[in-house]
Image (cartoon, rainbow, N blue to C red):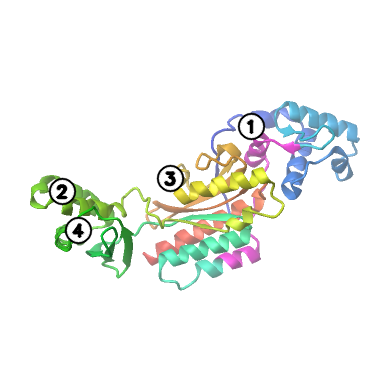
Amino acid sequence: MFFVLFNSGIMEDAPKLLDEMNDRSREVFRRVVEGYLSSGDPVGSRTLTRDFSEQVSAATIRNVMQDLEFMGLLDSPHVSAGRVPTQLGLRLFVDGLLELGVPDETDRGMIEATVGTTETDVGGLMDRVGAALSGVTQGASLVLTPKHEAAIKHIEFVSLGHDRALAVLVFADGHVENRLFNPPLGQTPSSMREAANFLNALIEGRTLSEARKTIGEHITVRRQQIDALAHELVESGMAIWDDDGEGPDRLIVRGRANLLGESAQAEDLERIKSLFDDLERKRDIAEFLDLTRDGDGVRIFIGSENKLFSLSGSSLVVSPYMNADRKIIGAVGVIGPTRLNYGRIVPIVDYTAQLVGKLLSDRS
């Protein structure tokens, strides 16, 4: 399987940096990063000496590590400690030295068992995909579900009280969506019926995207034909299916507890909580999908490269999935600490995205 990686563009000088490093420097750098990703601990020169490919002294390796630190690729948490990769170092490793394979048989089996389900509800299926991805990677999974773009058959508004109403949308393929929303103050049963009748006369046979455009055009032309409350109700009711895709159920987050381990320090917990505050507000949900639009491969965002979240101590591995027309309709991803096992996580995310895309394409 071939993987295409798209990074954030921060490391355009990666080839130049690698060219400046000789074979020994590259091996020291690679072993420091791999050791850190494996254990989370600084890697010292004596550790590298024991399993280095050539006979070199600890002093020689220390000199190489000092050069790499001067280049901004390694850092020393303490004076007497070993080295850890910087964000720049992790990006260089991911762009230039990361070796990718395919998910092992166990990982593929767990994902395939979920994606191959007979679940008919897309939302339920995607929730199970998120749970499987979280379980396989032991990270937090993010799944951006596709909007339903089948033709609309009927819409109805049901009052649940003075400040709550239910919008029921029936599609031609039998799919039904029920969404709660806050109607404008002073709405009456007659205004709700008038709004529903107005919509049904316009949107039957159109997709949501087409209906949104048509409704906007007709509201402008026929504004005088509906009273102000019905007009507000039309806008309030359809906003939950806005083409921007910011509906409350489109982003599925699973496995939060995987980022809240017992060993996490207080400041790490605060950053993680800040991350999930951002997720729960979903204020940047559109940008999550935008992260994947530059190509059909996996993208990796390390630390502060991750524009979506305020959390700086995390990495996001994300890949889009496409429909039969090769149009991006959603994305799957994994978020975790910067010391993710990228060589394992990247193929899993890519594999999951491809399977989800194929399943949804087959259904359509």
Which numbered disc, 2 or 1, marks the residue closer to the eye? 2
Kind of residue indicated by mark 4:
Ile
Kind of residue indicated by mark 1:
Pro
In magenta segment, residue 35: no
* Residue 316 seen in render: yes
Instruction: Tell me the CA gap for discs 2 and 4.
Output: 13 Å
Percent of width and height locating residue 68: 75, 30
- Depth check, front residue: 275 or 101: 275
Which tag, 3 or 1, sits closer to the chain's start?
A: 1
Kind of residue indicated by mark 3:
Arg
Q: How crowded is mark 2: few (under 14 residues within 10 Å), some or many (20 or more)?
A: some
Q: Dividing the picture into quarters, in which one does residue 67 lie?
A: top right
Q: Which mark is residue 219?
A: 2
In magenta segment, residue 105: yes
Which tag, 1 or 4, sits closer to the chain's start?
A: 1
User: Which residue corresponds to mark 1?
Assistant: 15
User: Which residue corresponds to mark 3?
Assistant: 283
Kind of residue indicated by mark 2:
Ile
User: Which residue corresponds to mark 4?
Assistant: 203
> Is 98 placed left or right of 309 in the picture?
right
Q: Which residue is located at x 14 percent, y 60 percent?
A: 194
* Residue 102 seen in render: no
Q: Which residue is located at x 17 percent, y 52 percent?
A: 229
* Dot 4: element: helix
Q: Residues within 10 Å of mark 4 (few under 14, many from 20)?
A: many
Which region shows up in magenta? 84-111
> Is 208 placed left or right of 343 in the picture?
left
> Is 245 placed left or right of 273 in the picture?
left
* Dot 1: element: helix
Which numbered disc, 3 or 1, marks the residue closer to the eye? 3
